[in-house]
């Protein structure tokens, strides 16, 4: 007999059919509920309906597989047994929750329905058992609210106008009831008020939706299951998936679970906690809880929660009693579960718990989202605690998280004198300065106009995700460190301050008032998300500190794991020093032409122009001689700064006309200085004009036509190295010839290098000089003839900017007109100038390396250009066996991490073996 597909997995009473590694089938929540059962942690019994059912449901016109009904009934029976209650039993009724849970966590993006099974049949029984009618009517009014909103309205596809939804209408009834009875908070409503309210709710639902609220437990259950599957394709979930890149095919699982109640009075509570602090990474149990509350009350930010323990109490918590104080025994039990979970999962967990009349139940555990600062601290400290290996630690920090630490913060100097407006909770790190907007839609629109904006909301709501994404900072008046805004911002590494209670935010009027001052849309504020401080006006932002000790230790760990070298692109001694501070192991690209721009470049630029404007080789040679000492000084400075680390120096690359002044006034000035006429200059500029300069007289072509220009540069480099050697300092130049397409170009230049080398050796009385000669590979022909090129070149550096331009035939500077459309229409998945196109450009790189190494096995290979700092491209460079990547100095730490991650992920299959 063929076995039916298993669609339902039971968990409860220390047993479970699922496991933590079954997330694809059971979703993250279901898999971990199962795992916690297996660990002996108290979890209310229940079962998970698999993601396969979700897929089936959408593939079959929203129908379930035939086997499902019976499997659910069987699992429900087991749950009833474990909880010693029965669903829909008037005498001893079991109530259920129905919870969504996809493979990847999508906090608050899908639906959950609580208190399922409360009907006129079961209510008297629950009242009798609890002796607490107030609690029962409160639970019932929550069920009607959630169910009518989630199942009867959203899942049914009804889309009422803003403020006209069933939930809002019921909330208004509740407000009226509070006003009538003089109740301040929800908790002030008595049993009889709530009972009356439930009657009003049911009438309202029938009147507005045209259908009665179901008074049948089974109907409630199946309605909720359907709504959870429907919510996979709800608007919020789709928006979140698009941002996070979660595939639509994954589907969600549905978890049906016995209810436990945090709202049964003073001995009951509910809370959310992290096994370590998700904002700072500190190894302290950090969380928030509320007495006499249910479900989402903590996360929704409706009531301000209290701290979990004394250790993590902050100035905001004054007057709040910690769980440690209020229920010491339960707290100890929870702390023990914290330790157990961390030991088991070897990572920081984000947990949900509920205390029902003194009994602790765990409702969820998952790997917690964290800031970049926290990710690094946890990775480093977990290695020290021997909880994880160095290789594991490397995978615990994403390049984007590391980027946060390398990103801008408010200028500490300017911050001292800035006007602090308010203090809230530091929910997302870094600094942000922008104009305020008050709705998600305004945020998206402003960001599209290219404005830097800060989204200000009273409380954040999952429907705001796109606006939150568009903003550079998020500010809310309500909510705690575990509120949705905080979770989402932290996940994205976005600057965010929540719970800033003194702000009076009026979204309709688009104003924010604080301390008698009113801010309107478009006014500037600045946020310090690491400390939770809001400032009026613009506070400048600055670059971060590369010497942060945790960062240094983490990156040192990455260095031990990676195989790929990391160099920086740097053009001056100053850049070189920055590059070394960030851990660069050399310079992968020094562009000589940069010495003719910026500070102190007047004289060399003048001499360069003189050289360009020369009309005979003799004149040019004379100009070169004058320029020589400047070039040598520049080369010597950078070589010295790198103290013997390799420095790849590219010979003059751009077309010469770029250096000729354009304006009439400037031309006249230059003519005067050179003692020639303006007409001479104009004529020479016309001579140099090219219709396609990027493919014109540039790179090695200059060296071939003006050998004296190459010679001057080569001499400058080699003499700089020789002088440093004489001074007892180390120097390792690598002379790089650009825009090569044929080995013959290289042979031509190599002859000059060989001659100059002899001259320099002689001049300095040296026997040898350490340096390499190599080339950029940036033209497809060079990649394809790499076996010839490597006969001369001792190293290759793939110039993937030009190689991409040449391979696609896209002008780098002109892609703006079509690249957005190409990405929108899916013609290209990514901009190939940002992420290396592995299919074709990558193929040229692979072929180039292979052919080059076929004649020179030890050929040194690197990459320079934008791709050298892009994590996906770095993985590719690792895979094809490059020796190093080179990127801008500030990207060096990212490259060190990405290279280490590539090394960890690229373990040969048999080593990876055991799971
Ligand atoms: P989300 O994925 O949005 O966090 P959950 O499924 O975790 O949604 O449900 C939200 C909240 O509802 C939980 O944090 C928990 O407080 C409450 N809840 C869910 N199931 C139960 C249950 N069986 N008993 C008590 N509370 C529950
Ligand atoms: Mg929810
Ligand atoms: Mg949850």
Image (cartoon, rainbow, N blue to C red):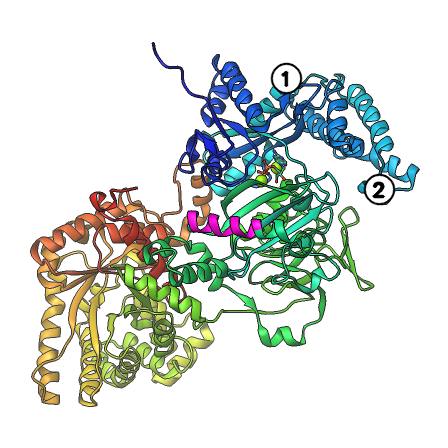
Q: In the visual, does 30 lie left or right of 579? A: right
> Regarding mark 1 in the picture, which secondary structure is present there?
helix
Q: Which mark is residue 188?
A: 2
Task: Residue 464 in the image: state x and y as whole percent.
Answer: 64, 43
> In the rendered structure, does residue 501 fall within the stretch colored magenta?
no
Which range of residues does the magenta coloring cover? 333-345
Q: Which mark is residue 218?
A: 1
Quadrant of the image occupied by residue 436: bottom right
Residue at the image position 50 percent from the left and 60 percent from the top = 283
Instruction: Name the residue nearer the viewer: 883 or 296.
Output: 296
Task: Residue 27 in the image: state x and y as whole percent.
Answer: 47, 34
Task: Residue 358 in the image: state x and y as whole percent.
Answer: 66, 43
Is 214 rendered above or below residue 400?
Answer: above
Residue at the image position 75 percent from the left and 20 percent from the top = 209
Instruction: Give the position of the N terminus as an image quadrant.
Output: top left
Residue at the image position 36 percent from the left and 49 percent from the top = 835
**Marked residue nearer the N-terminal end (1 or 2):** 2
Residue at the image position 8 percent from the left and 60 percent from the top = 791
Instruction: Name the residue nearer the viewer: 182 or 698.
Output: 182
- Whether residue 166 is visible, yes or no, is yes
Tags 1 and 2 in contact by the CB under 8 Å rule? no
Q: Which mark is residue 55?
A: none
> Regarding mark 2 in the picture, which secondary structure is present there?
helix
> In the rendered structure, does residue 339 fall within the stretch colored magenta?
yes
- Residues packed near mark 1 inside 10 Å, few (<14), some (14 to 19) or many (20 plus): some
- Residues packed near mark 2 inside 10 Å, few (<14), some (14 to 19) or many (20 plus): few
Distance Cα–Cα, label 1 vs label 2: 32 Å
Dominant secondary structure of the magenta stretch? helix
- Whether residue 448 is visible, yes or no, is no
Instruction: Give the position of the C terminus as an image quadrant.
Output: top left
In what quadrant does ligand 1 lie? top right
Task: Residue 621 in the image: state x and y as whole percent.
Answer: 20, 81
């Amino acid at each position: 007999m063929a076995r039916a597909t298993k669609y339902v997995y039971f968990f409860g009473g220390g047993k479970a059919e699922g496991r933590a590694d079954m997330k694809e089938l059971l979703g993250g929540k279901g898999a971990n509920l199962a795992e916690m059962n297996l660990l002996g942690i108290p979890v209310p019994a229940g079962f998970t309906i698999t993601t396969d059912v979700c897929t089936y449901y959408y593939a079959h016109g929203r129908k379930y597989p035939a086997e499902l009904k019976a499997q659910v009934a069987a699992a429900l029976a087991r749950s009833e047994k474990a909880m010693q209650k029965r669903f829909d039993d008037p005498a001893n009724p079991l109530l259920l929750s129905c919870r969504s849970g996809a493979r990847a966590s999508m906090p608050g993006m899908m639906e959950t329905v609580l208190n399922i099974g409360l009907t006129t049949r079961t209510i008297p029984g629950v009242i009798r058992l609890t002796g607490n009618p107030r609690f029962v009517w409160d639970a019932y009014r929550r069920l009607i609210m959630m169910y009518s909103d989630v199942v009867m309205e959203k899942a049914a596809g009804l889309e009422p106008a803003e403020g006209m939804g069933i939930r809002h209408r019921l909330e208004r009834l509740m407000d009226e009831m509070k006003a009538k009875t003089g109740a301040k908070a929800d908790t002030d409503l008595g049993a009889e008020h709530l009972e009356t309210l439930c009657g009003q709710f049911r009438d309202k639902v029938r009147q507005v939706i045209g259908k009665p609220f179901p008074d049948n437990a089974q109907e409630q259950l199946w309605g909720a299951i359907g709504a959870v599957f429907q919510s996979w394709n709800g608007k919020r979930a789709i928006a979140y998936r698009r941002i996070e890149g979660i595939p639509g095919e994954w589907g969600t699982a549905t978890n049906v679970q016995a209810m436990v109640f945090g709202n049964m009075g003073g001995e009951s509570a509910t809370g959310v906690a992290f096994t370590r602090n998700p904002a700072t990474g500190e190894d302290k149990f950090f969380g928030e809880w509320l007495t006499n509350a249910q479900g989402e009350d903590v996360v929704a930010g409706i009531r301000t929660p209290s701290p979990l323990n004394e250790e993590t109490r902050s100035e905001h918590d004054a007057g709040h009693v910690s769980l440690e104080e209020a229920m010491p025994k339960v707290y100890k039990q929870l702390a023990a579960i914290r330790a157990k979970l961390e030991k088991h999962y070897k990572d920081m967990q984000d947990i949900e718990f509920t205390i029902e009349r003194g009994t602790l139940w765990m409702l969820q555990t998952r790997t917690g989202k964290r800031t970049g600062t926290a990710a690094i601290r946890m990775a480093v400290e977990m290695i020290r605690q021997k909880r994880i290996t160095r290789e594991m630690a490397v995978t615990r920090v994403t390049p984007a998280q590391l980027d946060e630490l390398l990103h801008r913060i408010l200028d500490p100097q300017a911050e001292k004198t800035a006007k602090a407006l308010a203090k809230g909770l530091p929910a997302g790190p870094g600094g942000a300065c922008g104009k305020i907007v008050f709705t998600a839609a305004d945020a998206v629109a402003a960001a599209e106009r290219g404005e830097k904006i800060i989204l200000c909301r009273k409380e954040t709501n999952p429907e705001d995700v796109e606006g939150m994404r568009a903003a550079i900072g998020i500010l809310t008046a309500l909510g705690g460190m575990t509120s949705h805004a905080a979770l989402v911002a932290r996940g994205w590494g976005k600057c965010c301050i929540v719970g800033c209670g003194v702000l009076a935010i009026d979204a309709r009027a688009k104003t924010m008032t604080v301390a008698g001052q009113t801010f309107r849309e478009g006014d500037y504020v600045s946020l310090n998300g690491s400390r939770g401080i809001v400032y009026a006006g613009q506070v400048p932002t600055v670059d971060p500190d590369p010497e942060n000790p945790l960062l240094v230790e983490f990156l040192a760990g990455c260095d031990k794991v990676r195989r790929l070298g990391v160099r920086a692109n740097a053009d001056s001694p100053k850049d070189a020093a920055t590059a070394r501070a960030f851990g660069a192991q050399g310079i992968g690209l020094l562009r000589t032409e940069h010495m003719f721009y910026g500070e102190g470049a007047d004289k060399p630029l003048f001499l360069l122009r003189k050289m360009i404007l020369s009309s005979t080789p003799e004149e040019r040679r004379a100009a070169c001689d004058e320029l020589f000492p400047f070039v040598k000084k520049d080369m010597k400075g950078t070589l010295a700064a790198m103290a013997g680390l390799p420095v790849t120096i590219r010979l003059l690359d751009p077309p010469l006309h770029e250096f000729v002044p354009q304006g009439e006034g400037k031309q006249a000035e230059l003519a005067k200085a050179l003692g020639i006429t303006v007409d001479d200059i104009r004529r020479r500029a016309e001579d140099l004009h090219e219709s396609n300069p990027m493919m014109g007289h540039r790179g090695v072509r200059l060296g071939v036509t003006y050998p004296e220009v190459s010679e001057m540069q080569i001499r400058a480099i080699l003499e700089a190295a020789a002088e440093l050697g004489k001074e007892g300092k180390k120097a390792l130049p690598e002379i790089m010839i650009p825009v090569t397409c044929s080995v013959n170009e290289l042979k031509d230049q190599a002859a000059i290098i060989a001659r100059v080398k002899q001259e320099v050796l002689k001049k300095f009385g040296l026997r040898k000089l350490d340096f390499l000669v190599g080339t950029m590979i940036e033209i497809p022909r060079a990649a394809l003839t790499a076996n010839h090129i490597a006969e001369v070149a001792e190293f290759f550096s793939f110039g993937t900017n030009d190689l991409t331009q040449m391979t696609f035939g896209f002008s780098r500077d002109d892609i703006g007109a079509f690249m957005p459309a190409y990405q929108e229409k899916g013609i290209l998945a990514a901009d190939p100038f940002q992420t290396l196109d592995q299919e074709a450009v990558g193929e040229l790189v692979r072929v180039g390396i292979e052919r080059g190494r076929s004649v020179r096995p030890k050929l040194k290979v690197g990459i320079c250009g934008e791709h050298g700092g892009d994590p996906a491209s770095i993985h590719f460079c690792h895979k094809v066996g490059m020796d190093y990547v080179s990127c801008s100095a500030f990207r060096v730490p990212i490259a060190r991490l990405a290279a280490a991650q590539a090394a960890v992920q690229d373990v040969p299959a048999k080593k990876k073996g055991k799971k």
